[in-house]
């Protein structure tokens, strides 16, 4: 269940993607991750030119590790690949299927990422049973003031956005 070779086969690291394509890809890997025993969240770290550095999917259930959120997994992999703990040097952008939870917000804060693009909101995730923690508009406002972190919503077609969540509920894995 922890074999993520399916994930690497979906990614073309040599090309540049548009932000719409990257958000779509976040949802695609989220859905495939549910089919492979994981949670319905996906994340991608790119350089400032739309080239993928790393991808991450939610592996909380199969890894028995509450810190294995998609954003954290993508940030860990980007830092490992680039051999740095500071992703600001590559103008890294985090694309994520859902607005980051409190833990993932902390990972973004410490990683040096200055731009986050997301689709689904915290409130939408909560409707599905996920408790995303105490992030709110004030948290993000402070992040912008103190660290210069930009939070941008990029909407996908709702059917695409909800597909992974619906499959997750159908399978009965909600934690």
Image (spheres, rainbow, N blue to C red):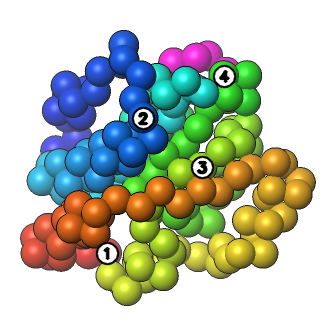
Q: Nearer the viewer, mark 2 or mark 1?
A: 2
Residue 29: percent from left, percent from top: 26, 45
In the orientation shown, which residue stands out farthest toward the right? 146
Q: Which residues are magenta?
A: 80-85
- State whether residue 63 appears in this view: no
56 to the left or right of 24: right
158 to the left or right of 140: left
* Residue at which label 1 appears: 175
Q: SS for tag 3? A: strand
Crowding near the residue tagged with mark 4, few <14, some 14–19, many ≥20 C-alpha atoms within 10 Å: some
Q: Nearer the viewer, mark 1 or mark 3?
A: 3
Residue 83 lies, with reference to residue 164, above or below; the image says above
Residue 114: percent from left, percent from top: 71, 42
* Residue at which label 2 appears: 18
* Residue at which label 3 appears: 116
Instruction: Specify the quadrant of the image occupied by residue 60.
Output: bottom left
What residue is at 23 percent from the left and 40 percent from the top? 2
Q: Earlier in the sequence, mark 4 or mark 2?
A: 2
Instruction: Specify the quadrant of the image occupied by residue 16.
Output: top left
* Residue at which label 4 appears: 90
Residue 70: percent from left, percent from top: 42, 49
Crowding near the residue tagged with mark 1, few <14, some 14–19, many ≥20 C-alpha atoms within 10 Å: few
Q: SS for tag 4? A: helix
């Amino acid at each position: 269940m922890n074999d993520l070779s399916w994930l690497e086969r979906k990614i073309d690291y040599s090309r540049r993607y548009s932000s719409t394509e990257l958000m779509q890809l976040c949802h695609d890997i989220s859905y495939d991750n549910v089919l492979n025993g994981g949670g319905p969240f996906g994340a991608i770290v790119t350089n400032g030119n739309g080239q993928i550095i790393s991808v991450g999917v939610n592996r909380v259930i199969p890894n028995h590790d509450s810190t294995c959120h998609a954003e954290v997994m993508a940030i860990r992999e980007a830092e490992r690949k680039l051999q740095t703990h500071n992703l600001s040097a590559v103008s890294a952008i985090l694309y994520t299927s859902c607005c980051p939870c409190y833990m993932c917000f902390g990972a973004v804060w410490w990683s040096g990422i200055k731009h986050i693009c997301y689709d689904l909101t915290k409130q939408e995730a909560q409707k599905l049973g996920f408790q995303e923690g105490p992030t709110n508009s004030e948290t993000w406002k402070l992040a912008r003031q103190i660290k210069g972190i930009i939070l941008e919503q990029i909407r996908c077609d709702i059917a695409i956005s909800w597909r992974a969540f619906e499959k997750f509920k159908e399978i009965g894995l909600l934690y």
